[in-house]
Amino acid sequence: MAKTLFLVASLLVLGNVVFLQASFPPSLITDLAKIVMDNYCSPEKLMGMKEDIAAAGANTDVLNLPDGESLAKVLTDGVQTTVSDPRLRVSYEPNYVPVVPPQLPPLPPEQLVAILQTSIKLDILEGNIGYLRIDSIIGEDVAEKVGPLLLELVWNKILPTSGLIFDLRYTGSGDLSGIPYIISYLTDTKSVVHIDTIYDRPLNTTTKLLSMESTLGQTYGGVKPLIILTSRNTRGIAEDVAYCLQSLKRATVVGEKTAGGSAKIQTFKVGETDFYVTLPTAKSINPITGSSWEVTGVKPNVEVNAEEALATAIKIINLRLQVPAIIEESATLVANNYAFESTGADVAEKLKERLANGDFNMVVSKESLEAKLGADLQSLSGDKSLSVTSSAGIAPPMEYSPEMYIELIKISFHTDVFEKNIGYLRFDMFGDFEEVKPIAQVIVEHVWNKVLHTDAMIIDLRNNIGGPTTAIAGFCSYFFDGDKQILLDKLHDRSTGTTTDLLTLGELTGERYGSKKSLIILASKTTAGAAEEFVYIMKRLGRAMIVGETTAGTSHPPKTFQVGESDIFLSIPTVHSDTAAGPGWEGAGVAPHIPVAPDAALETAKAILNKHIGGQQHATS
């Protein structure tokens, strides 16, 4: 039950001082409460107020305040606290003069336009960016009278612009019926759209505001960049316009959070007194968000000081004007270079569809464009390696001393020899062949020779995130005999149109492990890229048993492409494994022979090899 208006108000009386003689009529509080109950826009917030009115009418202490202004303040605090709405206000005005909204005089359309033009500012900025400032939203009736002239003098000058800045920073008045008129001209008119719902409490009506079925003249459409500027002085109907266009994702709001006004405010005289109560009698309910801009205001997509809003908007529009070319070029790069042709073509087509549907209409910075483009590429392809990347080139090789190389290798590799002479080798990334080649002898001496003479080996790639595939052929070669060359895989590169045979190497640094001794590879869903290629080859050729989880299903290491002349770069996988015998590992990953949880994979592998080696030893004894 709501608190009684009287109780809330009386608690705020200074020191609960009670004066001997009441200065105001006893019915004041009950009359005030009844006005609120009958007219306030959200009756659901007034539950229990009927009972409160009866209780309030029996208490008159608060009426003993010595002057109307003090009582009005106390009553304002009371109604605002009771209803939890700062828009309710009680005033004491012995000389009250009703505020009459300014009405345009019954003048010919030409003269009406001349008057309207004093509140309209139009400009064409550098770069063919339109600028339109309107300080009052005209209603439907006025628009019908002056529509053709406004079309000629204002709207037709805006239509050819490449983008529009709609300045509502100074707009504090307007007519509800003007909302569909403005929004219809700033969107597509292919179908009628439910813009807003207005509930009027005194009239007990719910009105749906719909976009217009047709407009006089051409609309601005739903694709060209549209920025709305706001400030803390943007109020009422202007807030509704900004909120509707923002919710429709047609406009980006730049500036300050708006005032948080009301769709409709009315003032009522309280009984036969000089007290008046002002309260919202209608409310806006947006059909998309289910919420409203009232009280809380419209939160900008890009929040800056009102003075900086115009400059910020110009930067955003200039970026937006580049977006179509960037997306088109990105689609072309993916279609022409992505490893799997059909997937690349599909991603490119859908990316262009999203551009046409306005999915990129809300980007506000290079960073937000990159984030949106990258997310779309990955969601459309299912490939995390297809992404937006930095322009950083390949870092120059580091110059290490022999001692530093040894320490680096000790950190990068982990070896062990378990019971029954089972070797264990773990490393978490593949290195580029050209970088590894100079230190191959160091790796052999400090890593490989520790596990070379074991009777079986476990290679742990559970945490291996990939890296270049240039070292794969060499690493695989250690686990095959050197008497013949073996075709490990065929790699097709779409960007160059070439297919390369991946073959075992005839010459290696150090000794081979050979093809006879048992080999188990541990894998997990973290195992990715080059590590997956190694797992795939060793499984397909029957050289190793795979234990653990299905690998990540990523792709071969991508190449970097610049998007046109922009400073945006794409990371595109261009290489795929031989698919003549069916799909490779890209996308799906490599399934293990023995699926177990990653943390159980090592013990499972040791148990398998212990049993296998034990059986061999028993057979030979």
Image (spheres, helix red, strand yellow):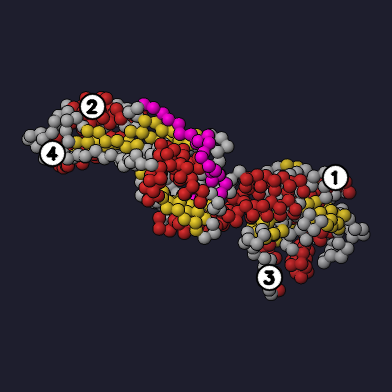
**Residue underneath mark 1:** 581
Range shown magenta: 204-227
Residues under numbered marks 2 and 3 in contact, where contact means CB atoms less than 8 Å apart: no
Q: Residues within 10 Å of mark 3 (few under 14, many from 20)?
A: few
Between 118 and 559, the residue placed more toward the observer is 118
In 3D space, how far apart are the residues under numbered discs 2 and 4 (Cα atoms)? 20 Å
**Identity of the amino acid at label 3?**
Pro
Q: For mark 4, what is the residue? A: 65
Query: How many residues crowd around disc 4 within 10 Å: few (fewer than 14), some, or many (20 or more)?
Result: many
What is the quadrant of residue 429 in the picture?
Answer: bottom right
The residue that label 2 is drawn on is 53
Name which residue type carries label 4: Leu
Quadrant location of the N terminus in the rendered image: top left
User: Between residues 178 and 475, which one lies in front from this camera angle?
Assistant: 178
**Mark sitting earlier along the chain (2/3):** 2
Q: Which residue is mark 3?
A: 396
Q: Are marks 2 and 4 in contact (CB under 8 Å)?
A: no
Identify whether 563 is placed above or below 613: below
Describe the element under mark 4 as helix, strand or loop.
loop
Please name the residue shown 77% across and 48% down the image. Answer: 341
Gap between marks 3 and 1 measured at Cα? 39 Å
Q: Give the side of residue 328 with respect to residue 48, left or right.
A: right
| Magenta segment includes 221 | yes
